[in-house]
Image (tube, grey):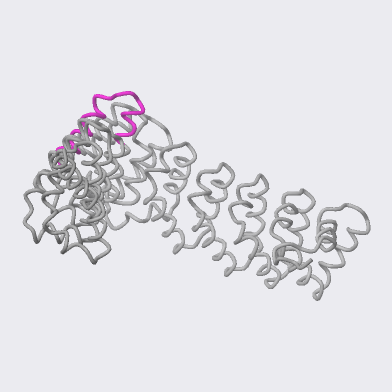
Amino acid sequence: MENDGNLLPPLLGMYVRSVMTSSEKVEVEEFLFIINSCHELPKFASLLTSDLDLFIKIIRDDLGMNRFRRIFGISDDVNTIFFYPIMMEFTEIMTHESGYDFASHVLSVCNIHHKKLFCSITFRHALVLARDDKGCIILKKVITIADDFYKDEFLDLITDKVYKLSMDDLGISLIEHVLKLDFTRKTTENDMRLHVLMAEFDENLSTSSYDHLHKLVEKLTSDPDLFVKFVKTRRGTLMFHIILGKSEETDTVVWAAIKQRFTDITTDFQGGFILLRTMYVFKKRGNLKVYDKILRQIGLHALYLTKDIDMGNTVIQHVLNLFNYECTTLIAIGLHYHYIELSFLKHGSQVVEKLLGGDNKTVLFSLLFIVIEILKCDKDTLVRLAKDEYGNGVLRKTLEIAKLHRNDLFGDLVEKLKPFLDRLRGSSLGNNIAAIIDPAIETVKDQIVSEGNA
């Protein structure tokens, strides 16, 4: 039987496994012969790494791990051979109980090139490792020993994903670890006032003095411009994801500061996630009064946020996924007279379609507004909407939802679009619309014929 390229023939597999995991004298002697032979060692390393499943089983064996550690580091060429299974099965290896010992040994003996390669692989799998107890420990180690280029890459990644990471203790511990790095602290050196203030926060976060923390937050938020500047830095946004949730009094001060500069903060990438974190901690604590106030504030700024493609739109889509009736209603009202305009935009059309995908009460409310605007469209705008990459999706979903919930509105849409069907046919997007309308027209014709025959 031919080898499929990933599995060793049975006899070779048994040989490799016994050499790596057996304590019998014959196998011990064979292992010692191999590692002392410049000719045999690369060939054996190739055999060992040609079956990924077998390789993982071997390094999960105590004796197998010890022998791997004796082999890895003998030469750069052998190390290069071993990096193939490491790359292919990285998370599988690193999240195992032996993963930390494995990673520590690899990093301690490999050359600069391989160390950078290991950092690169870790970066690609960082979010998976961050969710695993053992993987997170390895991730912290790699970030610590990485050069400044990779530290900067890791800092960017963790800042970008800080909202999700802050949802559990592992993520929080990773954020805290990154904040303690000298590299992270140096990122604010160009603004001495900010840098000194952040050093005070660093000192307080290490002592867990909530009273002092509260006073520091009050000091920061007393200057709205400084607060906005603070939260827009990578270091600042990581800090606030740690601070939020420690005490309700401090969280209330933060929310008051966000509200004061609401659009500035909500349309900033880091600031927007701090708003979402603030909303999350109030809901988790059970303070629905403040939680609802935050949702209401978002709803009242619906149009401005929807048009902001950097972060405001993300916030709007996030809260629409919560299916909060009052907030969704405020968004629907806030976008009235702008649905057609938004439907031509990628991010705008996503919001409009989400408004048509909620529960029945909010869907009908949004549907009415959208249908009214479609019915008021001139023929050129309507045809352009039907043929537009994003507008077509909105029009198609409006027709489908209207047909499902409101036959009267669906009928009005059919009558509006019927004169333009010939202009729509011939393009794939236009055909989508015609495919929904044609059966409705035929049904009406059949009814007329039926009534005439009666």
Q: Is residue 212 magenta?
A: no
> Furthest-front residue in view?
453
Towards the viewer: 322 or 127? 322
> Furthest-right residue in view?
25
> Furthest-bottom residue in view?
39
Towards the viewer: 369 or 223? 369
Question: Image quadrant of residue 390?
Answer: bottom left
Towards the viewer: 314 or 440? 440
Residue 71 on image: x %, y %: 75, 63
Residue 356 visible in rendering: yes
Q: Quadrant of the N terminus?
A: bottom right
Q: Is residue 317 above or below residue 252?
A: below
Residue 194 on image: x %, y %: 27, 49
Q: Is residue 231 left or right of residue 38?
A: left
The secondary structure that dominates the magenta segment is: helix
Towards the viewer: 29 or 214? 29
Residue 49 on image: x %, y %: 71, 64
Q: Is residue 298 magenta?
A: yes
Q: Is residue 97 left or right of residue 157?
A: right
Residue visible at 42% across and 34% down in the picture: 207
Residue visible at 88% across and 58% down in the picture: 28
Q: Is residue 78 left or right of residue 155?
A: right
Residue 453 on image: x %, y %: 16, 41
Q: Is residue 408 above or below residue 7?
A: above
Q: Quadrant of the C terminus?
A: top left
Q: Which residues are magenta?
A: 278-301
